[in-house]
Image (cartoon, helix red, strand yellow):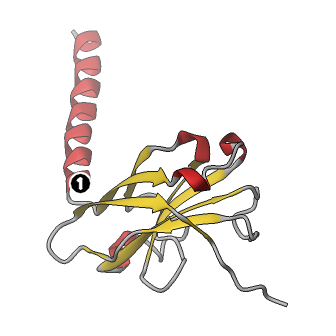
Amino acid sequence: MKYFILPLLFILSNAAYSVDNSHGKANQRQIKVDVTIERNFLPSDPENWTLYVYAARPGTRLPLSNYKGKLSQIPLQVKLDETMFLLPELTLKQTEKVIIIAKATKSKNPHDKSNSDIIGTSEELSFNHTNQLSTKVSINKFDHFKSVK
C-alpha cells in the first residue's frame, strides 16, 4: 500500500504546484511583441546577426525584460515577462510605462555598437489598466549611436 501512496502524493503535490504556479503567471506583467523588418533593412546574411528584443523605460535603453535570438527568425513573436530580467532591481514590476526595442547587430557583444546596427521601437505602452500588453515593432532604421572617446 505504501508503494502506491507515496507516488500518488508526489503526483498530487506537483499538480498543486503547477496550478499555483500558473495562477501566479496570470498576474505577472507580460508583453506580446510581433517583430518584423522592413525589406530594405534585411541583410543578406541574417543568420549572422544577433537580435535583441527588450522592454525599457521610455528614454532609456536599460532592459527590464529581454529576449536574444537571430535576425533570421523574423518575422517573430516574442513574449517578454517579469522573469526575463538582467538585473533583479530592473524588471517590468518597477515601472508603469515601457517601450519595446528590437535591435539587430553583427557584434557578439551587446555593448559594442556599429554604424550597421539596425533598430525599431514601439510606441509607449502602459501597465496602468492591465498586466497583459501587446505591440508590434518593425526594424526600420539604423541605430545612430554616440561614440564615447
Left or right, 108 with reference to 1: right
Residue drawn at x 70%, y 43% as measured from the top left? 44
- At horizontal 14% and vertical 73% (from top left) the residue drawn is 129
Instruction: Say which of 141 and 20 sits in front.
Output: 141
Q: Is residue 37 left or right of residue 107?
A: left
Q: Quadrant of residue 17?
A: top left
Instruction: Name the residue located 58 percent from the left edge and 54 percent from the top edge.
Output: 40
Horizontal side of residue 104 vs 133, given as left or right: right
Q: Quadrant of residue 121?
A: bottom left
Rendered position, 88 above or below 1: below
- In depth, the one of 75 and 126 nearer the eye is 75
x 24%, y 73%: residue = 127
| Residue topped by disc 1 | 24
Question: Residue extending furthest front?
Answer: 40
Q: Residue furthest bottom?
A: 149
Residue furthest to the left: 129
Task: Identify the image quadrant of the N terminus.
Answer: top left
Q: Quadrant of residue 132?
A: bottom left
Where 136 sits versus 13, above or below?
A: below
Picture coordinates of residue 41, whole percent (x, y): 60, 56
Q: Nearer the viewer, residue 21 or 93?
A: 93
SS class of the residue under badge 1? helix
Looking at numbered disc 1 in the image, what kind of residue is underneath it? Gly
How many other residues sit within 10 Å of disc 1, few (<14), some (14-19) or many (≥20)? few
Residue 80 vertical position relative to residue 44 in the rendered view, above or below: below
Image quadrant in which the C terminus is located: bottom right
Name the side, left or right, on which 143 lies relative to 19: right
